[in-house]
Every structure is written in C-alpha cells, then in structure tokens.
Amino acid sequence: MDFNDFASLLRSDRSVRRFDSSRPVTRETLSQLVDLTRFCASGRNAQPLRYKIVSDPETCSTLYGALKWAGYFTWWDGPEPSERPVAYLVQCLDTRYGSDCLCDDGLQLQAITLGARTLGIASCIIKAFNRDKVSGTLGLDSRYQPRYVLALGYPAEQVVLEEMSGAEDADFRYYRTADGIHHVPKRPLSELLL
C-alpha cells in the first residue's frame, strides 16, 4: 500500500449512522477486527483494553436502547429498525491494569475501523451511552469499564467530506441534506499547521 492508497482508505473511514440490517457481520470477522488491536502501540505497553462482541439480534436490540445517536441531529431519534447496526464491539478498560488507558482507546478504535473499511464494513464510534445499562445488558464484571461502543454493519448511507473555509468561525457540525447524504466538514491543512 502506498501513501495515496492509505490516504484514500482514511478518507473512506467515516462515521456511518444508517446500516443495512439485512447483511450480518460474522463473529469471526469481529474477532479478526479485534485481533488488529494487538499490534497497536500501547501506553506503558499495559494493553489494558478488552472487547465484548455483540452480534446476536436480541442483545444488539437491547444494547441499541442504551445508545445516543448523532448529537447534532436533535430532530432524529436514530436509525430505523431496518437501518440499525448488526453488530457492536464494546471497548472496556480492564481496571486491573490501571484507571487510565492513555491513548490506547483511540489508536485501537482507528485500527478496527480502518480494518473494517477494507472489508466494506462501516462503523460509528459512540461515546454517548448509558454505561450502567451497557454493563448490565452484557453482564460485565465490575472491573471492566465500558469506554466506547463501536457500531458496525454494511453502510446504508453515503457520507461526503466537505472542505471547510479557513475562517475561525466556520461551522464544523456535520449535517444531512434532503437527499439523505451525510456531510462532514473538515478543516483545511492551512488551519492545522502552526
């Protein structure tokens, strides 16, 4: 893979909030995605993160009720039943190894989402959820603290990147147009460099 291939993969790794619920993602595929995290850098090399695979429809449905979707879409209650994720990976901190995972959570989530994109699978990293309900639904031991829920499935929406203006007050909020396309503004490189 060259630099341009990698940049293209990264551009395609967008948060998707509507999925094709008729297309399952196998438990084996989910395990392979989690396996990618073993090769990520880890603060202190503690490797404190664990993953709970959720792929059976009943648990997926219960877990869905603990999640909040698309904070900027105050008018939207989340995906319709036919557009809900078919699988989840719940990232948990194993507190036996400390109370902070440093940067491991983001590194591992990016590895998983990039790996998923190579398989045509889309994802949405969710931080807004009811932790007690997630822990209870999954029967997690108290030493495992849920940090993120990663929703997965084949995409049922198009996500387009938009170049933001360089103005300091430019609107960075994602939005959906009448045709159902999800737009994500991105700051220009000139604004990132000091």
Image (cartoon, rainbow, N blue to C red):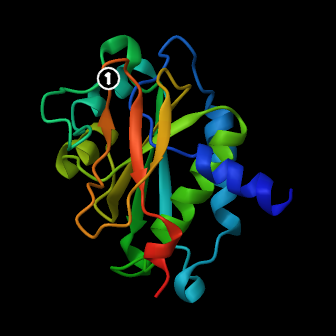
Would you identify the image quadrant in which residue 75 lies?
top left
Q: Position of residue 155 (x, y in %)?
A: 52, 26
The residue identified by callout 1 is: 61
Q: Nearer the viewer, residue 79 or 91?
A: 79
- Amino acid bearing label 1: Ser
Q: Residue at 70% of width from left, 45% of height from top?
A: 32
Q: Residue at 23% of width from left, 50% of height from top?
A: 128
For the N terminus, the quadrant is: bottom right
Would you identify the image quadrant in which residue 172 lies?
bottom left
Q: Nearer the viewer, residue 193 or 79?
A: 193
Residue 3 located left or right of residue 98: right
Residue 54 located left or right of residue 138: right
Relative to 40, residue 134 above or below: above
Q: Position of residue 4 (x, y in %)?
A: 78, 57
Q: Look at the image and tell me whether residue 53 can be seen.
A: no
Disc 1 secondary structure class: helix
* Residue placed furthest toward the right: 1
